[in-house]
Image (spheres, coloured by chain):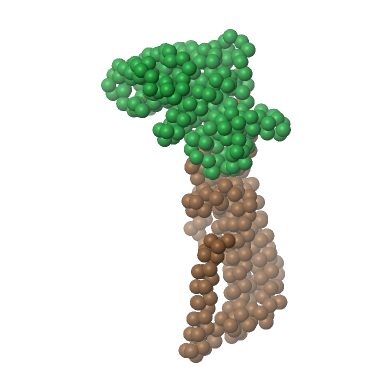
Amino acid sequence: MKQRAVVVLPPLLCGAAFLALWELFVVTRHIKPFLLPKPSAIWGQFHGNFHLVRSSTRVTGTNALIGLLLGVAAGVVVALAASRFRILRELISPLATSVAAIPIIVLVAIFNNLFSITSEVPRRLMVALVVFFIVFLNVAKGLEQTDPTHVELLHSYGATNADIIRKVRIPNALAYLFVALRQAAPLAVVTAFVSEYFGGTQNGLGARITQSIASSRDAAGWAYVLAACLLGLAFFVLAIAIEHITTPWRARQANEFSSIPTTRR
Amino acid sequence: MSTTNDSPAVEVLGATMTFNRGRANEVVALDPITLTVNAGELVALIGPSGCGKSTLLRLIANLIEPTAGTVRVNGKAASQARLDGDYGMAFQQAGLFEWRTVTRNIELPLELKGWDRTRRRERASEMLDLVRLGDFADHHPWELSGGMQQRVAIARALSFAPKLLLMDEPFGALDEMTREHMQGELGQIRAKTASSIVFVTHSIPEAVFLANRVVVMSARPGQIAAIIDITLGQRDELTREDPAFFAHVTSVREALRGLPASHGAGVDDR
C-alpha cells in the first residue's frame, strides 16, 4: 500500500500544482476568459451544468460503447474466419494494415447520408469500423503467432486441428485481443466524439463544445472537454481492468517487461 | 507401466529423410538409419549440429513422415503410436502454456484424451509429487525457475503414463549446476516409471551419465557413426567422478573426433 502511494502521489501533486499555476496565471495576468478560462470557472460550469454534461456524455459514451462492442465482435469473428480460410486473410490483411494510414473517420459523412438526420447509427458504425480493424489485426496475429513448441506438443498428443485452435490459438490470441482493446477503447471515444462534427443530432459532447464556444460560453466548452477526457479515461481504465482480470499472466508480463505480447519467454 | 509385450520401444528400419525433395535446395537430412531401442532402455543421440538427431527424434514421434523406410513404436506404426499416446515428449523450450497453472499444464494431454476432471486432478498431483513440485500446483509458469519449468514439462510428458519418453535437448537451456541436478532427477524418475527414453543432447558427459547406449551421429547426410554401450550400472553423483565414467566420455569423444574434421564442430565437451 505504501508503495502504491509512492507511485500515485507524485503525478497527483504535479497535476494539482499545474492547476494552481494555471489559476494563478489567469488571475494575476488578467487573461480574458474567452482566451483561457480559470480552472475554478470550468469546474463551476461542470458542476452547475451537470445534468447537461451528464446527458451529453451519455450520448457520446453510448455511441462509443455500442460501436466498440460491435467492432470487437466483428473483429474477433472475422479474425477467426481468416485464420481458417487463407483466402479471406489475404484479402483483408493488406486492407486492414493500410487503414491505419487513412483518416477513415471522414466516412462518417457518407454514413450520415445513408441514415436519417437524427440517427446515431452512422457514428456507431464509424466507431465499429475503426475498432474492427485494430481488433482484427491483433487477434489475427495472435491466432497465427503461436509458439511452435506448443503446436508440436499438441501434435504429439494426437490432437486435431480443432483442438489446436481451442487449446493453443484462441488462448494465445486472447492476450492480443486485450492489447487491441487497450488501444481501441480510448479510440472509440475519440471517434464517437469527432464523428459529431460531421452533422447529425447535436446532443453529444463534441457538438456541445462547438455550441458553447460559438455562443462565447467558453468555460462551459471547457467543462465538456473535461467530460470528454474523463470518458476516454474511463474506457481506458475499463479495458485495462478487463485485461488484468481475464489474462493475469499477460498483465504480469506487461508489468515485468512492458512489451508487446510474446509467447516465448 | 511395465511393457505388456516384448516388442522393442522403437524400431527404425532404413528410414531416410530428404527435405525439399527434387528441388534446388534439396537436403538429405538422414541417410538410411536403422536403430532399435529396447524396452526400458535409455538411448542418447549425440552428434554435431545438422547431423539429423532432432529429425530422427521427430520421425520416431511421427511429427514428420520418413521419405523412405519404416518407424515402429511399441510394435505399432509410429502414426498409430502417436494417436494412442504411446510416447510423451519434452523439448529444449519447456513449452508450458503461460495461461495455465502448473496443474492445468500437466492436465492438458489428459484433457485431450478425454479424462474426467477428478481423475485429471489426481494424476496431476501424483505427477507433481514425482517431480517434487507439489507446493507449486497453482503457480503459473512465469513464477518458476528454468529447471522447475523443465520438471513440469517432464511431468506433463509422463502424465498419461506413456511407455516411451522422447526428449530433445531438454536440459540444453539450463545452467551447468541445474543441468546436473536435472540429470539426477531424470534418473530417479526413470527408476520409478520404468519408461524407455530417447534423449537428444549436445553434451558428451550428459549422454554418458544418462544412457545405456550412446548413438554417435555424423552430419550431411545424417547417419549413425558408432553406437557405444555404457556399462556404468546404477548412476549417482559419485558416478561423475568415477574413472569408468571418464573412460566412457573419452570413447564417445573419440568416436565424435573420428568423424571428418568439418563434421566434428558444434559438439561441446561439457
Q: Nearer the viewer, residue B71 or A195?
A: B71
Give me the residue at 55% from left, 41% from top.
B141
Q: Is residue B130 visible?
A: yes
Q: Which quadrant: the C terminus of chain B?
A: top left
Q: Colour of chain B?
A: green
Q: Is residue A129 above or below residue B208?
A: below
Left or right? Give the position of B240 relative to A74: left
Give me the residue at 58% from left, 83% from top.
A40
Q: Is residue A106 above or below residue A34?
A: above
Q: Which quadrant: the N terminus of chain B?
A: top right
Q: Nearer the viewer, residue B119 or B166?
A: B119
Q: As drawn, which residue projects farthest toward the front?
A: B238
Tell me where residue B84 sits by quadrant: top right
Tell me where residue B261 sits by quadrant: top left
Give me the residue at 42% from left, 33% from top.
B177
Q: Is residue A91 visible?
A: no
Left or right? Give the position of A80 relative to B179: right
Give me the residue at 46% from left, 20% from top.
B235
Q: How many marks?
A: 0
Which chain shows up in brown? A
Q: As drawn, which residue projects farthest toward the left?
A: B261
Residue A181 in the image: x percent, y percent? 59, 55
Q: Is residue B116 above or below residue A174?
A: above
Residue B149 in the image: x percent, y percent? 52, 36
Residue B167 in the image: x percent, y percent? 49, 26
Residue A5 in the image: x percent, y percent? 55, 65
Q: Nearer the viewer, residue B105 or B28?
A: B105
